Amino acid sequence: MALTTSLTAAVPLTAFRDNRGVVKTTTYRMKQRQRGKQQEQQRQVQAVFGNFSHFGDAVRRDVEFLKKGVKRGAEWASETFRVPQVKKALDDVVWLRNLEDPHFSPPAQPPPWPQPYYPELSGLDLMMADLKALEAYVSYYYYQSKKWSKPLPEAYNAEEVVDYFSRRPHVVAFRLLEVFSSFASAAIRIRMSGIKKSLRPGSAKGIDENFAQYNFGMVLKETMLSLGPTFIKVGQSLSTRPDIIGPEISKALSELHDQIPPFPRPMAMKIIEEDLGSPVGSFFTYISKEPVAAASFGQVYRGCTLDGFDVAVKVQRPNLRHVVVRDIYILRLGLGLLQKIAKRKNDPRLYADELGKGLVGELDYTLEAANASEFLDAHSRFSFMQVPKVFKELTRKRILTMEWMVGESPTDLLSGSTSNPINHGSKYLERQRVDAKRRLLDLVNKGVEASLTQLLETGLLHADPHPGNLRYMASGQIGFLDFGLLCRMEKKHQFAMLASIVHIVNGDWSSLIEALTEMDVVRPGTNTRRITMDLEDALGEVEFKDGIPDVKFSRVLGKIWTVALKYHFRMPPYYTLVLRSLASLEGLAVAADPGFKTFEAAYPYVVRKLLTENSAATRKILHSVVLNKKKEFRWERMALFLRVGATRKTLQWVVASSGETSIDNLPNGTNGVFDVAYLLLRLLPSKDGVVLRRLIMTADGASLVRAVVSKEAKVFRFQLCRIIADILCQWMFESLGQIVPASQYSYHLRLAGGPENRELGPSSRLFTPTYDYQSLLKDRRLKVIFFKILNSARKEPALMLRFYWTSFVMFIAASALAFHRLLISLSEAHLGTLPFAPKRFAMST
């Protein structure tokens, strides 16, 4: 066998090239020998270490059996020996809650320490002095002992928290030991996983890397689950930042939103009875046996009130406030130690204090109920958003009762849109997948608009915008949950954020730094030129695709965060919340549609805000974008604004303000983009057109004329030509009213532009919707604007000559189009409808 193998290996493969069958046989033998070598290596390993596969299966089954038995025994022992009550009593002893006095009132000032007396005093004086000293000692130790009875403050206060836990060092020490042991165990598991991976032969490097990252995330998730609510909150926040921790770790940590173990139902019912003061049955006719959702701070049951309303009953986890504040105190200690080691001037413990205020505020469900009501009142006028109502009579500090909302979570929609059905030939499953993708993208678009509405309209932001707190309703609305934290913005910061979005889209980094300075993000004295240069180097020029900026939000976000850390930006809470919300929504959308761009979805809303809000701040932003320092139009910026403004999203308010019944009656091209010229003519004379009228009056008229006659404005001139043809057509039809019936003219105008005009033939597609152009021509404001532009352009004769020539050509083309329409209408009125479809005949034999 060895001789045969060596001879075969010694023969070169070129000797068998003439015979293809022999080559195949040789290749097959080589593969067989390689497979045999691998099997031989496995047998040698098993010969040395033994084959423990069957033994491992048996041990695994025994362990599972023992686990079930131990679990049943633990449940029986817990019920028989009242383990929860004993555990609570021990917990109270450890935390010294028996010594706490809820009506504690500290003395005005501590008694002074006794001072020594001189020896010249008499015996009676010494005895009296000893008695006074004894009294002082007793008063001092009594004062010190009273500090033990001071309870944990209801609202977070850093000094009181430090004072509380400084008298309970054993509680802090036990928790530190628990945290250290948990992370040490996680490190050992990760290390063992790496060793096993290195012993596994023949695996792909890229797959192993992704698997290692995901395994690290799973271990981290389990560690945070074991450490309790505060660490779960931290993990949930990290899961929304894949740009920092990586996509695989983020995917593993995202399970913290849905896979948190609940606490027992009897304990939850006891909390409801304690807070409401009566049995559960006196308030609810039904409460689900199992919680429908379990969060880090509480869990939700579905219930029904005595009035028959379906409600969600949120119950807080027991003894949660002490646990959360203890972890914040430990974090504060760690940040203080870090400050001393790094010798930083600013105090990082302030971040722990801000986190503590937010988390402790979330523990009071009456505050969350007030937040939900405020959020509902502020956003009730936006029909695409839905906020549940609060039942205040059934809400307490540890119980929150709200309207039940039926909707799909983003994670469910994502799994449905990215799933690969086993039966690839099933049209039904494919249709389900496409429909799930459509609903997910609709949710993301409305989520982006909701974020901008909160940011730029109401100034009231949802402070925890992760996917677990969003729902896609059957009505197509986006529903919000969990109002434990809200962020409120000042008006000047709203305008600064609006300017930031506009400057990011246009790649104007110097203006972006100015906006960030107005928001107090950039520290005084910082070299803004260096920041601008770093942003330009990091992001470069913004590319445009079909006139829309092709900007990846996550890329912009990552670069801004890098620069922010480098120059120690003071990021306000609302800035972080908005960026995190948009990044989270983009992550959902990109998973279903890799071509999704957040700015492309957000920019129509920004354009609508700038073109309609008549305030000094918005006018300043608009002028800085579309005008240069000489008040000349930047046609590329103006074209972008008009192109985005002519989309279906932005035209909703034009339709509403002009009295149109439907947006489908407006003339449009492909991809839902409407005629820019038609948009201008509808917007300029309207009450919402005051911003645009002011912009044109402020700008240099010659630059506007120069932009209109440029090559870039060819599409705009074509659209304007069609409008002139409409005006001429109206005049001719009114003049020839006896020859062409009015019903025929209105019939054609009614058909044009509608969704059904593809089936009406060429003649009806030549018309645009009817519009009262006579009132437009008589508008004095538009006349003033037009003559102001001409007077400004008369200073350049060559430009005026070019303008007159362009106008003449447009008029000739519009006249030809109008006469064409007139001839078609006359032929249809007097010769009958022209048959465009081929006739079909039935012939019999």
Image (cartoon, helix red, strand yellow):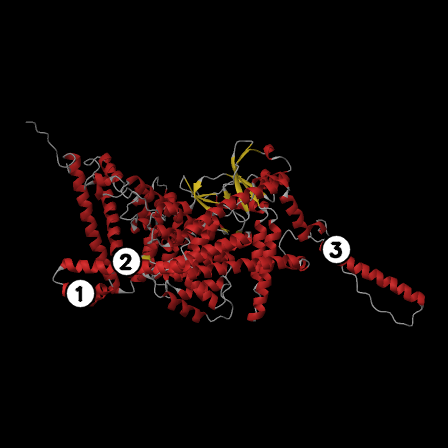
The residue that label 1 is drawn on is 13
Q: Would residue 560 be visible to someone looking at this image?
A: yes
Mark 2 to mark 1: distance in Å? 74 Å
Q: Nearer the viewer, residue 3 or 356?
A: 3
Which residue occupies the foreground of this view, 344 or 723?
Answer: 344
Question: What residue is rendered at 41% in x and 59% in y?
Answer: 49
Mark 3 is surrounded, within 10 Å at the Cα level, by few (under 14), some (14 to 19) or many (20 or more) other residues, namely some
Lateral position of residue 400 relative to residue 826, left or right: right
User: What is the secondary structure assignment of the residue under circle 3?
Assistant: helix
Q: Which residue is mark 3?
A: 146
Residue name at image x 16 percent, y 41 percent: 823
Query: Considering depth in this image, is 107 or 634 the residue closer to the camera?
Result: 107
Residue 708, disc: 2
Q: Position of residue 573 (x, y in %)?
A: 51, 57
Quadrant, the N terminus:
bottom left
Mark 2 or mark 3, which has the lower sequence index? 3
Q: Mark 2, residues whose alpha carbon is within 10 Å: few (<14), some, or many (≥20)?
A: some
Residue 68: x and y, percent? 51, 43
Please report whichever mark, 1 or 3, sits nearer to the chain's N-terminal start. Answer: 1
In the image, what residue type sits under mark 1? Leu
The number of numbered badges drawn on the structure is: 3
Horizontal side, residue 466 vs residue 423: left or right: right
Q: Amino acid at mark 3?
A: Lys
Name the kind of residue labelled 2 in the image: Val
Comes first in the chain, label 2 or label 1: 1
The disc at residue 698 is none
